[in-house]
Image: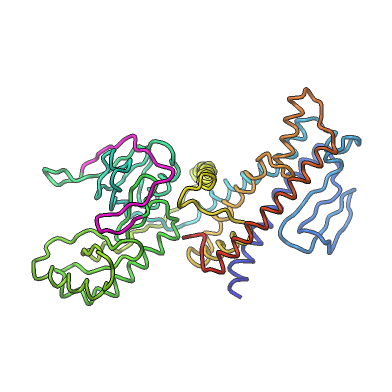
């Protein structure tokens, strides 16, 4: 039942709503320009109910996973009320209106999410380690630097830093950090410019002898739990919570080995790492080594250090934006989501390690359930915005059968001085595109199911 209520139903409602909005764009503009709409349906046939009104049949269909608008003469211009008989500019607006609405809806959803009070991290973004010989190391970034700006944009948490570094992958990044002055010890602003954010950084062996997965610039950032650049906010929270649980479990045993205010902590994913707590005497160090041997027997050469308990207190605050700033930020987030999607596709095409896998409806339904379980129902607004952007961008691409494929034929017509491709040839190209899309759907769904059966997740 949880799978139905937390994964399948939320995903189906989101997808159906976004596709209905998409098709509403086609419907409204077709009606405005005098194109005859034969049928407007919600769901995928077979039809279970229908009514005809003013020359258009409105139907409800059995599979609630989409919607459609069927217009007269989509490739055949023989009827003056057909789509194909309209001037190029009208056809462009009618065909492109669905994708445009999806992008507009994404802006609105992002804006609404920003206007609702929500919790954000403000715990800072301290660099825990810098990979040897990475662009970050060569530029002069150091472990212990507190990132305050990335390309002039404020950084208040490691989620902010991770997001911005992923956004600027493949380009040069300017950092502003707070770094202790070697003479006075006081933190001072230091600018580190022209750091290249690599597309495909390679794993490296850290000072603990543990193989680490790098972030785009070779930086690992965090507070308490050390989280690699490029992790999702949800996964970051999981790692942090696990580290906090580890701290609570082991702090009682470590109390005798640590000076006042310090406790031992195990860090779970690739290395055992944290900021060293000063003031350990020889006796306490010996007790710490004994405790390490007891807790981590068989662990190859772990780093064992001490953290003050306050390092595990996640610092958050509740924020909300006024409508106008929220709309501006929502528009920027929409554009940046497109850029992040481009980076993901580029990573898949080039076979980069760490690139998120291509997924279909089954995988998105799984991710929907994970978002609900881990981040709450409010986060569904952000997920819906991301899906809406994906639908909009996909339909702008020149893929046969999709809106972008039809727009591409209009562009060819323009290049040919108004001479059209024969309707039967265009219809054949769209048929080939349909077969290709269905084949891709089957392949992606297979791998989604394999991942779910094997216990995998899109969020980690």
Q: Residue furthest left?
A: 282
Residue at 57 percent across and 62 percent down: it is: 368
Left or right position of 356 against 189: right
| The quarter of the displayed image where residue 86 is located | top right
Residue 192 visible to an observer of this rendering: yes
Magenta residues (range): 188-212
Image position, residue 300 (x, y; %): 27, 66
Q: How is the image coloured?
A: rainbow
Left or right position of 176 against 17: left
Image position, residue 205 (x, y; %): 30, 54
Residue at 28 percent across and 51 percent down: it is: 129
Residue 330 visible to an observer of this rendering: no
| The quarter of the displayed image where residue 75 is located | top right
Q: Is residue 198 magenta?
A: yes
Image position, residue 15 (x, y; %): 66, 57
- Taking depth in this image into account, of 325 and 58 the one nearest to the observer is 58
């Amino acid at each position: 039942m949880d799978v139905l209520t937390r994964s399948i139903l939320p995903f189906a409602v989101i997808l159906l709503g976004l596709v209905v909005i998409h098709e509403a764009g086609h419907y409204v503009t077709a009606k405005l320009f005098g194109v005859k709409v034969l049928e407007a349906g919600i769901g995928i046939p077979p039809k279970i109910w229908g009514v005809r009104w003013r020359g258009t049949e409105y139907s409800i269909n059995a599979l609630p996973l989409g919607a459609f608008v069927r217009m007269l003469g989509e490739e055949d211009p023989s009827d003056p009320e057909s789509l194909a008989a309209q001037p190029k500019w009208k056809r462009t607006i009618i065909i492109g209106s669905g994708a445009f609405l999806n992008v507009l809806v994404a802006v609105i959803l992002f804006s609404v999410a920003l206007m609702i009070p929500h919790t954000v991290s403000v715990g800072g973004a301290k660099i825990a380690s810098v990979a040897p010989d990475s662009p970050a190391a060569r530029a002069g970034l150091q472990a212990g630097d507190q990132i305050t700006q990335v390309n002039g944009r404020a950084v208040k948490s490691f989620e902010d830093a991770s997001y911005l570094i992923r956004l600027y992958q493949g380009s040069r990044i300017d950092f502003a950090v707070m770094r202790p002055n070697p003479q006075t010890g006081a933190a001072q602003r230091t600018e580190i410019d022209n750091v290249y954010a690599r597309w495909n950084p390679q794993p490296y062996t850290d000072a603990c002898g543990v193989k680490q997965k790098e972030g785009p610039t070779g930086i690992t950032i965090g507070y308490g739990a050390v989280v690699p650049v490029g992790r999702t906010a949800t996964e970051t929270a999981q790692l942090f919570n696990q580290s906090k649980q580890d701290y609570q479990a082991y702090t009682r045993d470590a109390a005798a080995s640590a000076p006042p205010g310090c406790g031992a902590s195990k860090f779970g994913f690739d290395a055992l790492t944290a900021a060293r707590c000063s003031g350990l005497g020889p006796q306490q160090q010996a007790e710490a080594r004994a405790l390490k041997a007891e807790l981590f027997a068989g662990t190859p050469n772990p780093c064992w250090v001490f953290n003050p308990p306050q390092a595990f207190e996640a610092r958050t605050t509740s924020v909300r934006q006024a409508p106008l700033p929220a709309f501006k930020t929502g528009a920027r987030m929409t554009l940046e989501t497109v850029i992040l999607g481009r980076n993901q596709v580029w990573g898949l095409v080039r076979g980069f390690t760490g690139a998120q896998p291509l997924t279909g409806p089954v995988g998105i339904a799984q991710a929907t359930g994970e978002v609900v379980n881990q981040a709450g129902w409010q986060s569904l607004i952000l997920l819906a915005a991301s899906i809406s952007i994906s639908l909009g961008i996909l339909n702008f691409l020149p893929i046969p059968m999709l809106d972008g494929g039809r727009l591409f034929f209009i562009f060819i017509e323009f290049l040919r001085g108004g001479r059209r491709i024969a309707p039967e040839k265009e219809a054949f190209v769209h048929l080939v595109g349909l077969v290709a899309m269905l084949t891709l759907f089957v392949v992606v769904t297979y791998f989604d199911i394999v991942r779910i059966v094997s216990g995998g997740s899109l969020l980690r």
